[in-house]
Amino acid sequence: MSTTPHQFDAIILGGGIAGLWLLSLLRNQGYEAILLEKHGLGSGQTFASQGMIHGGIKYSLAGAMTGASESIADMPSRWRSCLKGTDSVNLEGVAVLSEAYYMFSDARLSSKLTAFFGSKAIEGRVSSVPSADYPEIFQSPSFGGLLYKLKDLVLDTRSLVTHLRNQLKDYIFEGNVKFEHTNGQVTQLHLDGGLTVSADTYVLAAGKGNGDLIHDLELKVPMQLRPLHQVVVRGDSLPDLFAHAVTLRSTDKPRVTFTTHITGNTKAWYLGGQLAESGVARNETEQIEFAKKELANLMPWIDFSDCEFSTFRIDRAEAGGETLLRPDTPYVRRHGNVIVCWPTKLTLAPMMGDMFMALMTEPKTNAARPLNLPQAGVGSSPWE
Ligand SMILES: Cc1cc2nc3c(=O)[nH]c(=O)nc-3n(C[C@H](O)[C@H](O)[C@H](O)COP(=O)(O)OP(=O)(O)OC[C@H]3O[C@@H](n4cnc5c(N)ncnc54)[C@H](O)[C@@H]3O)c2cc1C
């Protein structure tokens, strides 16, 4: 066996949306790049995510447009271009769960909601839905609230990860690495099994796993974890629901965020938003009881008695400090020959990709030697 390390332009650690997106960009632009994944592709936050590709309207519920809502306004159209195969990452064929996303309120809040949606700041990004066009779930005479449609879409994250994995499988490997480094510069990576690899640039795109990698490399990069307690409701007869339930009274966040998925032979509603944030303080039984009350309040015309409820906990991993405030943009910074990335949101992957490519120098490696490593497979989601 050769003892000289296999040399690449870039080695990416982590195969969630961040790592896969960057690998696609790098390979498309002629870089000899590979990705090493420790568990299963997508198995971190990417499969736990609700798959919403949104333009940030939910962050402007408090009234003013915030940095967060401004920076992501373009993202749904960028993703739509990718889905058509006309942007830098080709996602033609990835399954879209919903081409539309809604926001609804109960009747009591309508006047405040009307004023909010009528405001100049969000003009053109939201439209009110005439009752004749209501999706099935809101056609009940018991629904007395207002319904708005956003220019957002919902992707099937399994389809997204599988698609990128199939496109790039020759460059994606299972691997757990140990760094060799001096003075903050990585010199090479040792893989389980004795293989050694090295690169001009090492990319940390391991989500929560970046914490350990940053620590091993003694980099001064702050990471924050924001815990969530998500709820899954399974039931064969659940109607499709892709919507935020909003209350403008007391919070700037959606009260509950709903997406609908197929798991096995069953339909499932996946519930996040404020419910998942406040739910961190509740145990599983309390969280399920709380979710049942929210559902009874928001849609009293639906019978959930045959549905099966479950919960799981997951952390959002982001750049941050002690405040646990949500960052507005991706984090992409070069520290010597290491680039640390957190997309902050699935939605922001195209922006993260632009920021990343701006930090890369020209490719140098000609035809890297093939690696004799097992290819990484697609992982499982925390709620399947
Ligand atoms: C409950 C929830 C719902 C969300 N919903 C949305 C949404 O609807 N829309 C949206 O825009 N965003 C959403 N997000 C945010 C979004 O999911 C994340 O910002 C995004 O998925 C992060 O991607 P990532 O690739 O950085 O991390 P991850 O998806 O966590 O991937 C990291 C990968 O690195 C691997 N790894 C870890 N350590 C190592 C190592 N040492 N070596 C190699 N590999 C390693 C892991 O196994 C994993 O596969 C949500 C997040 C959560 C938690």
Image: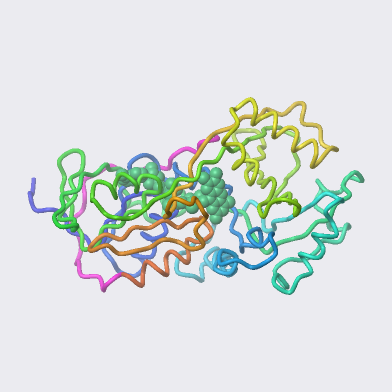
Q: In the picture, which quadrant includes the N terminus?
A: top left
Horizontal side, residue 371 vs residue 164: left or right: left
Residue 94 visible at all: no
Magenta residues span: 360-384
State the image coordinates of residue 116 (x, y, percent, origin top left).
Answer: 76, 64
Horizontal side, residue 101 vs residue 338: left or right: right
Quick one: 353 or 229, which is closer to the camera?
229
State the image coordinates of residue 234 (x, y, percent, origin top left).
Answer: 67, 32
Quick one: 59 or 130, which is closer to the camera?
59
Q: Is residue 258 above or below residue 20?
A: above
Q: Is residue 326 above or below residue 126?
A: above
Which residue occupies the extreme front position in the image? 322
Residue for point 70% across, 72% down: 121
Asked if residue 323 is among those painted magenta in the image, a careful observer would answer no
Q: In the picture, which quadrant includes the C terminus?
A: top right
Horizontal side, residue 150 vs residue 363: left or right: right
Number of numbered discs on residues: 0
Colouring used for the render: rainbow
Give the main secondary structure, helix, strand or loop, of the magenta stretch: loop
State the image coordinates of residue 357 (x, y, percent, origin top left).
Answer: 36, 69
Residue for point 64% across, 31% down: 287
Q: Is residue 336 above or below residue 15?
A: below
Residue 198 visible at all: yes
Asked if residue 366 is among those painted magenta in the image, a careful observer would answer yes
State the image coordinates of residue 342 (x, y, percent, origin top left).
Answer: 41, 56
Which residue occupies the extreme right position in the image? 141
Residue for point 68% across, 27% down: 308
Figure quadrant of residue 79: bottom right
Q: Is residue 137 above or below residue 286?
A: below
